[in-house]
Every structure is written in C-alpha cells, then in structure tokens.
Amino acid sequence: MMELLAPAGSMEAVTAAVQSGADAVYFGYGDFNARRGAKNFTRDEAAAAVSYCHLRGCKVNLTLNTLLTDRELPAAAEVAAHASDIGIDAVIVQDLGAARMLRQSVPELPIHGSTQMSVHSLDGVKLCAGLGMTRVVLGRELSQDQIAYICQNSPIEIEVFGHGALCMCWSGQCFFSSVIGGRSGNRGMCAQPCRLNYGWNGKANEYPLSLKDLSLAGHLKQLQDMGVACLKLEGRMKRPEYVAVVTGIYARALKENREPTPEEVETLRQVFSRQGFTDGYFTGQKGPDMFGTRQEEKEPRELYAQARSAYESGENRKEPIRMYALIQPGQPAQAAAEDRLGNVARVEGPVPEEARNVPLTREKVEGQLQRTGGTPYACEKATAKVDGSLSLPLSALNDLRRRVLEELSRQRQTPPQRRREPFQPGVRYENQKEPPVYTVSVRTAGQVSGDLLKLRPALLYLPVGEGAAHPDTVRRCQDAGVAVAALLPRICTDRELPQLEQELVAMRELGVAEALAGTWGGVQRAGRLGFQVRGDYGLGVYNSQTMKELKRLGLLSATISFELKFPQIRDISKTLPTEFIAYGRLPLMITETCIIYNHCGRHTCENVNLLTDRKGERFPVVKAWGCRNELLNAKKVFLADKRKDWQRLGLWGARLMFTTENPLECVRVLERYQGQGRYQPNDLTRGLYYRDVE
C-alpha cells in the first residue's frame, strides 16, 4: 500500500498524525529546514518523537531541505549525526552539498531528494539515484501521465504531494521572497508574496499568483496503480487538529482502498481551503480555475474539538503482534511477543505449582495474553502450551504479558546502530587572481547585434529554441570569434524532451559544444547529447561541497547563487570556474500556468506584460520555454560602478543577463562594464550581494 506521509510542526502534531493513521511523519529541528517559521523541535523533543513513532510503527523523516553556507554545514552535520543516532528513518535534502556531507558523515542514513530540488523528469530522478538518494519528491506541477512515466522507469522510490498548499513557482526556483524582502524560500523563510494582491495596468486589484490548495482526493487508486511509493500531505505550519483531520481522511481512504467521500472532501474544505481545491496540474486542466484566496470563515471549532478528543483519548493505533506462552512443570513460566518487523521479546516468570482445584488451561492463558487494551498493540493471535495440571495466579500471567510488551517496546524503540564519521570539508582551492571575464546571456536572438559581438564577450548563452530557429545568429557569433553555449530551459518535462533534444542537436550541428543547465535533468540531458555542461543558478550553488559535487559530475563551471553576499562568495572554495550574475533583472518566479492567459484569455507573451504590486512596482512577465511564464524583478541589478567589490572574489565570469533590453541597451551595458560610456539603468538595485538574507 502507498505510504501516507503527514506533516508535524510540533509534538502534539506528531501525536495527531500518528493516532490518525499516518505511516510516516516529517518534521524539522534546528535552522536547516524549509519551514523555519514552524515551531519545530528541540533535540530532546525530536528523540522523544522518534521513540513515540517507532513504538507505533510509524517512520520519521527529518527535513534538512534548505541551501546551506559553508559555515552552516558543520552544524548541519551535527544535526544529521544526532538524527542518525536517535533513529530517524531518512533525511530530506535540497542542497547537493548537504547530500555530499550526509554521505560522508552518516553514510547509512537514507537520503530523500526534496521537491525543492525541482526534479520533474526521469533524467533528474536518475541523477538523484546516482547521488545515493533512495527517494525523490517530484515537482507538484507534473501531470498524471508524467508521474506515471517516471514511476514506471525510476530506479528509486517516487513521492508526490497529495494535499496542501501549492506554490505558484516551481519549488526551488523561487526568489521572489528573498529579492523583494530578504527572506529566502530556499532558506526556509518564505514570506509568501504570491498570496498578496497584484494586477495589470497599474492596478493591484487581483490575486493572479495565489493558487488554491492541492487535493488529489479522487485519484488515490490511480496513484497507487502508477507505483507512487508515498503520498505526502503538506502542512507543517498548520495546527495539530488540521493534521489529525486531513491525515485521518486520507489514511482511512487508503486503508479501505477507496477515494474520500464527498462528505470527507467537504470536511477537508472546512479545515482549510482557498475557495476550494485544485487538481489542475495532475489532470492537465491548467487555468484560472486553479486560483483562489483564503476567505474569512468561522473556525470549525466542533470539528477541531472532535479531532483533538480522538487523538488525545489514548491508543487509536494498534500494531499487530503475536504472543506465545509456555508453562511446564518445574520450569519458570515463559512468554514471548513478536511483531511484523521481526522483533521478538522473551521474559520468564515464576515456576507454576501443581493445581489443587481448577488447573490452568490453554484457553485461559491465551485469553490473558490477548488483553492488550491501553497499549499500542493488538494481539492478532495468541498461542499457549500448558503441560500437566498446573496453577499460576492471574496476576503472574498479567505480569508476564506486561513485561514482555515492555521488552518488545524497548526493542522497537532502540535506534539502529549506524556508522558515524567526522565531517571533513576537504582541501580548499585558492581563488584565482585575474579579474573575471564577461559572459552574456540573451532571451532572444534579436538582442545579438553586430555591435554587441564587436565587444567580444568571452561567452554568449543563447536559448536553445532561439539558436535552433536562428542558425544565422550562431554563425555570426562564431564568425566574430564569440563562443556560443546553448542555454537550456529552466523547466523541461519528459513530454517536452523530444523538442528539446531536437533543438540541442540542431545547435550541436552548428558547432556549439557547450550548454548551460539549471536543473538536474538538464545536466543529464545535455551531457548525454555530448555537450560539455556548465551549471546555472537554478542548481542552487551555495557552498564548497556543492562545487565539489558539480566537479565530480563533470561540469565545466558553476554559477554561484545570487542569494549570497560578496564575502560568502569570496570564501567559497572554487573547485570549478565560477561566475555570478553581475547585471540584469533577477528571475523571481517561473510558473507552470500562464499568468497572462489567465488574465486576458489570450497568449500575448511576445509582448512584455507588467504585473503591478500594491506599492506600484511593475514586474515584467515574459514568455519562457514550454508556454510558461517568467516573472522578473522590477529593478535591474547594476554593479558596473562596484567593480572593485567583485573583481577580487576569485570569480571566472561576470554574467550580464539580458531579458527585456533592446539591442542598443545590451551594447551600452556591456560597454559600461568594460569601462566605456556612462550607461546606468533608471531603476537599479545591488541585488542581495550587500544584504543579509534570512
């Protein structure tokens, strides 16, 4: 049966989830999880939670799913070591460097790839498997046929979200909260700007980025038939009563091999919804109906009270066990208990006496063994052997039962013995002394003018679709002595793979040998087609360990995360040539649903559409590969006048990222960075390079 994984933001929520039928729970403790705003756990609480869960047959996953700095990795290694010691069943990670650290320091602790890794293709899953992960959580934007295809061909377990809040942006690719407010979703501090009001034509009178909550109630059997290993419920920020209600409904449906009833779906809506639920991504019905906001409604106090009463009332959950007893003359009475995990407990009691009146019977002994009320066990079968005419007080039988169950509980709560190794960051590479070269990325072939090529950027990143459609642009670059690399789309599902491969092959035939990839699937695909691969910002390069992993994977270079400050960038050991975003509109979101079409019913993506927030800021919304949207920052990062600050960071490349600029602007920007002219954008920002990001 498909595992049901429930959220827990507190110890009470653990109790609520377990008593409501969860097969596993996930929670975080420390500062390294994607819900740092949740109550989370202390180390002692985490240990108590693991014991509580394991006693009742429930697994525990630890969320360690944020991007980590070099300074944080040793502390994260300590958290992981403690998690392994207390018996955590798996750790969920986003950061490739964190995964490398885990393999080194706790090599026997299973690793699951977080949805924050933006894995949305079989190639991405296979790369995660090669990194030693045993399970991957797929992106929530995938449709049923895409999930089915991955499950059929995956070498590791697949987990999908089944209920709860949906992010507007592909998880792991959202920088809206950090760029606008200094609170990074990749660091567990998302301020949820997508839930605010925005609009068009200068008015912020709509909610075009607020999706309804996901619910796959109605598709459970289909998910099981696909081979999905685990159904995940979202909600670590929610109250325990919510966890109890939602977990209980899905647990009962799975156990009874059915879908939630209309009445149960209405109960789900009562505990939390944003004008109902959506399964639009799963069914492929993407559009305006997927969006909604949280309405002011009365708290379902009676429903919450019933849920709380149920999970506080004792042991609703019973683990099946078998019990045995052997009572022989002249020998201490013996009892044993066995669970389905293979644990066997044995205890001895007093020596029975010869019966003076009514002798002890097998039925009487078995009846006493089966009385497990008040414990987390249900005796599915009791077997006793009583030799001769013997007598043993009921109190002695009850004591045998009590002690054997205590011993069984001790065994179930004993953590596995796992190997621990000290975390060793390894050799540090010296920063290069030469100032970085200039690389350029464009959004359209039309931005590549002859004047731009005369300025001889070291490398020009051209989107694969543009390069395949405009081979003359590639040839003009080559004739001008400017190397071209194929810029892969940020999102490409397996369904879209034939188109991408066709475009990549076209560029390769034009003599393009390098590709820039920002997802793990893209890294795999480009490499498979014979390209030398460079890593883009979407890979979340935040520490030296990630750099080392990218080098091990054979990458040519890496793009450092633009959520880091300059001193942090300077201190990273640059195992690979490293570039940073020195100019341009930072990407805030990449969305699976077309915001523009949702608004006006037409695809006017070739134009630059401006989304306005409540403060009057205007964010360009541009077309992304695969009929997606990219939401860009209202202000452009501009650092030409700050060269002294970043030319000494040991970087190989400074990328000028052209998005909404016309060809003349592109030339003026590159000239200014090369020390010519006086260009400066009207509305500029220094990005996050001088600011602390939570």
Image (spheres, grey):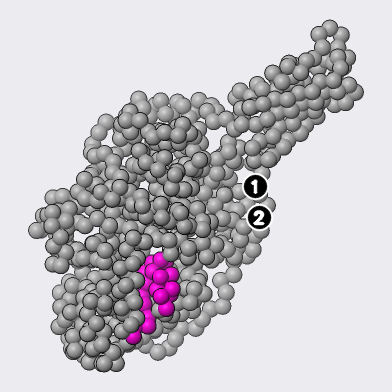
Q: Residues within 10 Å of mark 2 (few under 14, many from 20)?
A: few
Q: Quadrant of residue 361?
A: top right
Contact (CB < 8 A) between labels 2 and 1? yes
Element class at badge 2: loop
Q: Amino acid at mark 1?
A: Pro
**Residue 457 shown in magenta:** no
Image location of residue 61, percent across then percent down: 52, 49
Q: Compared to 5, does 270 lie above or below? A: above
Q: In the picture, which quadrant includes the C terminus?
A: bottom left
Horizontal arrangement in the rendering, residue 73 relative to residue 172 (left or right):
right
Image location of residue 620, percent across then percent down: 18, 65
Image location of residue 527, percent across then percent down: 43, 75
Q: Which mark is residue 415?
A: 1
Q: Amino acid at mark 2?
A: Arg
Q: Which residues are magenta?
A: 511-530
Q: Residue drawn 49% across and 83% down?
A: 430
**Residue 518 shown in magenta:** yes
Element class at badge 1: loop
